[in-house]
Image (spheres, rainbow, N blue to C red):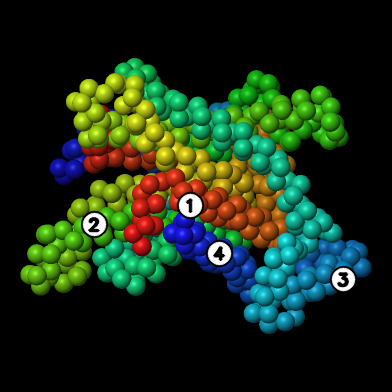
Amino acid sequence: MYYIKVLLKSHKFVIGLFVLISIISLAILYPLINTNDPKDLVAMAFEPPQEGLILGTDNFGRDVFLQLAHGTRTSMYVGLLAGIVATSIGLILGLMSGYIGGLIDDVITTFTNMFIVIPSFIILILISVSLDVRSATLLALVIGFTTWPWTARAVRAQTSSLRSRDHVNIAKISGYTTPRIIYSEILPYMASYVVMAFVLQIAAGILAEAGISMLGLGPHDTISLGVLMQWALLFEAPATGAWWAFVPAALFIAAISFSLNYMNSGMDEIFNPKIRRN
Amino acid sequence: MNVYVRYLLRKFGWYILTFFIAVTLNFILPRLIEGNPIAMIVATMAQGMTDADRQRRLFESFMQQFGLDRPIYEQYFIYLRNLFRGELGVSFGMFPRTVENIIATSAPWTIGLQLPAIITAWVIGNVLGALAAFKKGWFDKIVFPAMLLANAVPFFAMSILLLYFFALNLDWFPIGGGFSPRLMPHLSLTFIGSVVRHHTLPFLSLVFVMLGGWAIGMRSMAIYEINTDYVLYSKLMGIRESKIIRYVFKNAMLPQITGLAISLGTMVGGSLITEIVFNYPGIGMRLFTAIRTLDFPLISGITLFIITGVLLANFLIEIVYGLVDPRIKSAQLEE
């Protein structure tokens, strides 16, 4: 509760949160009002915005605004799931490597450094190309499995410096078990960092999904913001002047990414006073 | 020097190992699909082909080049051997062109787009970031949020917005392509003019986004340095302001130089989506077409090309850092 109060004092965090909540509520509420299937054909192709069709229709004559709401849902879901997977893997590997040390540390660190250097988006492409069936969930898992290394590296660095502190030694002498030491003596010190990393991982997951979808490797079963933009480009919406088919999706992605980054930046200034200017 | 050579060898070994793992992933991941992907794709490709002779030639060239009838570990060695010779196979989609030939003709477009964009963004971004940190006041209050906004917009969203405003709405620039379709590539002012006009929007969309990142990085590094003890100590000693700023700037620059080198390395992979938005004839567009036509050798060749660039850039940074960074130097001496 205390942390929430502190965070709400940061303008950046509040602005970011406000934008994010507005977008999420639109994505959740609009499909409740307009219960049509976003894949239904409702009018001619590339109809401009008009009454009843807030953002006109796409190349097949489907309702763009409804697709946008559903696409935002999918994109947020993919980002969230990818963020959870990536942060968990990064946290677990980082803690193991930093706390246990020795050979395990060497192996995990080498592994992490390798996957920091090999671009994750390329591995994402290679895996996606190999998948016959790509659902949104599967894509989110793959994104999560390719974007953990930075979190792992940072968590490892913090853990190994915390490991030799006095309070951890006292906990060890008192006979605490390792999981308990990690839970009560180490995690609280990096909780703020982990939350911040998680927020950025969500943003990265959403962008990765959009990127991979625009390459034509997106989910087959659902509409996401990236899939919307890919359709628009594939069916030459820019050449026909149908801005409503791709500009809103791009704006939504930009707004989501902006709000998450802004929240992260606000948290950073609160938790990390060294970069704050008084 | 002896110490440095040992450092160099260790780094070299590490990068060779990483490269080896990347190559192995590049080989193994696409082969995880059930059945033999290349044989499968050749089969599906062949169904759509009316030219029986051509499909047989395509299939045979792959059988021979990748040894598809042999066990997987043998295929792996053949793959490595081909790679070592610089042979990446023949494209399915643009048969009989080789993958290395296709990459060689599209890479200059990507590099011509990215290299000027990265350098322009780096210079302007660092200047803006440093000014925001030192000048404070209204300048910082305007520049910082603007940069944060620019940095948070993904490349492709920026591309799409610029495309909409400047190509569709205002009609100042063409909506895509590398040059006017009415022209043949040749050396003349009209052709160069056409290339420049097609280059402008993708170039700007890359610059705007990257600019933000550099400015934010520079600003927070500079503020961090200004808050350190050595700055306070220097001030108390009465050292001139301009001299202190020089120290601060020098320290804040180091990570920015690393960042520049890394983004030069990731250059080829960095504009994939921007190229797709603008239909720009670089590596990204090739990858897009390759994925749609299941041109498997081309996909794999492009990913390998990108990975190689990134690894090479990182390796070069470590070599240079081993020479210039006193902290790494002392770490070498300790061993």
Give the mark, 1 or 3, whose residue is nearer the N terminus. Answer: 3
Marked residue chain, label 1: B
Question: At which x and y percent is residue A135?
Answer: 53, 60
Question: Which of the image's four quarters has the N terminus of chain A?
Answer: top left
Q: Foreground: B160 or B301? A: B301
Question: Which of the image's four quarters has the C terminus of chain A?
Answer: top left
Q: Residues within 10 Å of mark 3 (few under 14, many from 20)?
A: few
Marks 3, 2: nearer the viewer:
2
Marks 4, 2: nearer the viewer:
4
Question: At which x and y percent is residue A213?
Answer: 58, 50
Marks 3, 4: nearer the viewer:
4
Give the mark, 1 or 4, whose residue is nearer the N terminus. Answer: 4
Mark 3 lies on residue: B56
* Residue type at numbered disc 4: Ile
Mark 4 lies on residue: B16
Q: CA distance from mark 1 to mark 4?
A: 14 Å
